[in-house]
Amino acid sequence: MGILVSHPHVAAVSARLAEGLAREGKLAGYFTGLAFAAGSQPGRIAEALSGSVPLVHNRRLDDSLGDRLHSYAAVELGARLAARAFGRLDGRFSTYNALFLAHDRAVSWAPWPRDTAGVYAYEDGALHTFRRAARRDLRRFWDLPTPHYLTTEEIFRQEERRWPGAALALHQEPEWKRRRKDAELALATTIIVASTFTRSSLERLSVKAPIRVVPYGFPVAEFPFRSAPPSGKFRVLSVGAQDPRKGTPYLLEAWRRAALPDAELHLVGGLRLARSFLDRYAGLFQHWPHVPRAELASRYAAADVLVFPTLGDGFGLVMQEAMCCGTPVITTPAGGGPEAITDGETGWILPAGDVDALVEQLRYCAANRGRLIEMGRAARARAERWTWQDATQGVLQALED
């Protein structure tokens, strides 16, 4: 079985899968954007530049890919330039849309390795690739990294009723994108998701294709266990998009009510909330719109606990990153929490949207910092039991079933 893996920009989930398949001798090809084999001359140049250009470090891939790596750098760069030039005129030229649409077309036109028996592609970047695969009667594996779009839209509507005016805009996919997603789903012969929550968003639609849940692997090599426990003020960290779906309003309200002395709340990521709403919590938190990935490990290590109060996520890689560093996590069942965390041992899983429960948990954590250190060790041990190598084996089993 040779699997062609397609993703437009070397996302960790696709790169680790491709490398794992290559080691098992089951990769037909990894079709992606700008990428380098680590041991190649371009790869060595990229490593030399990684200090000043951090992005290129993430584009260096395992030498095990060999000639199975197909880097469509020109397609990725062209899509990014088109998005910059036309993004404000047409939503199809947003950076995300331009990357996925252009890459899908390019892969559907490209020569495919002769041993290709199946195609593994991701939501929004699979339509034309799947159509070609269907004409050749090849298996089509659709990776859905987020809950189905109808579930996501429903969450935003509910949160608008709960927090009127908090969101900058209600999320709703344009009609052309809905049709595209529906067509990809209809073409899939197997669906791969990372959490039972995402699977449930599909099961409500009575999807016919089999759905396999394979949690993402913990990135233990990229996020080492911290060398010392946190010191100084009690610090709570939240990483990722800060918006209603991610539960940021609940975190801010819980932090205000908890009123913890000698404590700090740090938000990392785009703050997609209205200024009129944020003014209610002025002075209660510190915000960094962007932190380079290379610096995230030190942020996790310096925090007593990571809070990920999502109302609907495909998984939540930040939970795994924090756990690798020895930082326990507070989250909800509406994402990958049940797959990653043992409640009360490596973190806590609270009811989604429950401010009172979050207030109580924050107060407990602040009063029991020693217990958090113990849980952090258990979190790292949990991470080492399910690495990307284990996740690849899980995907392989799903592909072979």
Image: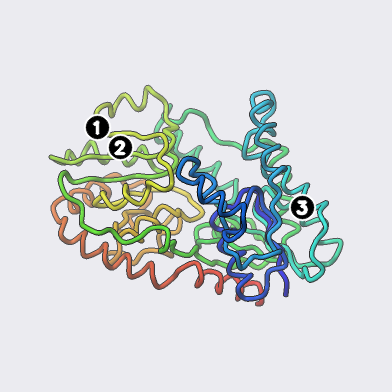
The image quarter in which residue 16 lies? bottom right
Q: Is residue 175 above or below residue 277?
A: below
**The C terminus lies in quadrant:** bottom right
**The N terminus lies in quadrant:** bottom right
Q: Is residue 396 above or below residue 99?
A: below
Q: Nearer the viewer, mark 3 or mark 2?
A: 3
For label 1, the crowd category at 10 Å Cα-Cα, with few meaning under 14, some 14 to 19 and many 20 or more, is: some
Q: How far, Cα to Cα, is label 3 from label 2?
A: 44 Å
The image quarter in which residue 223 lies? bottom left
Labels 2 and 1 touching (C-beta < 8 A): yes
Q: Residue furthest right?
A: 135
The disc placed on residue 284 is 1
Query: How many circles with numbers are drawn on the protein?
Result: 3
Labels 3 and 1 touching (C-beta < 8 A): no
From the viewer's perspective, tell me whether residue 124 is left or right of residue 273. right
**Amino acid on which disc 2 is placed:** Leu
**Amino acid on which disc 3 is placed:** Val
**Residue at the (46%, 33%) spot, across then down:** 160
Q: Nearer the viewer, residue 136 or 342?
A: 136
Position of residue 152 measured from the top left corner of the image (x, y, whole percent): 54, 45
Of mark 3 and mark 1, the one earlier in the sequence is 3
Kindly identify which residue carries mark 3. Answer: 107
Q: Nearer the viewer, mark 3 or mark 1?
A: 3
From the viewer's perspective, tell me whether residue 214 is left or right of residue 69. left
For label 2, the crowd category at 10 Å Cα-Cα, with few meaning under 14, some 14 to 19 and many 20 or more, is: some
**Residue at the (69%, 52%) spot, across then down:** 71
Kindly identify which residue carries mark 2. Answer: 252
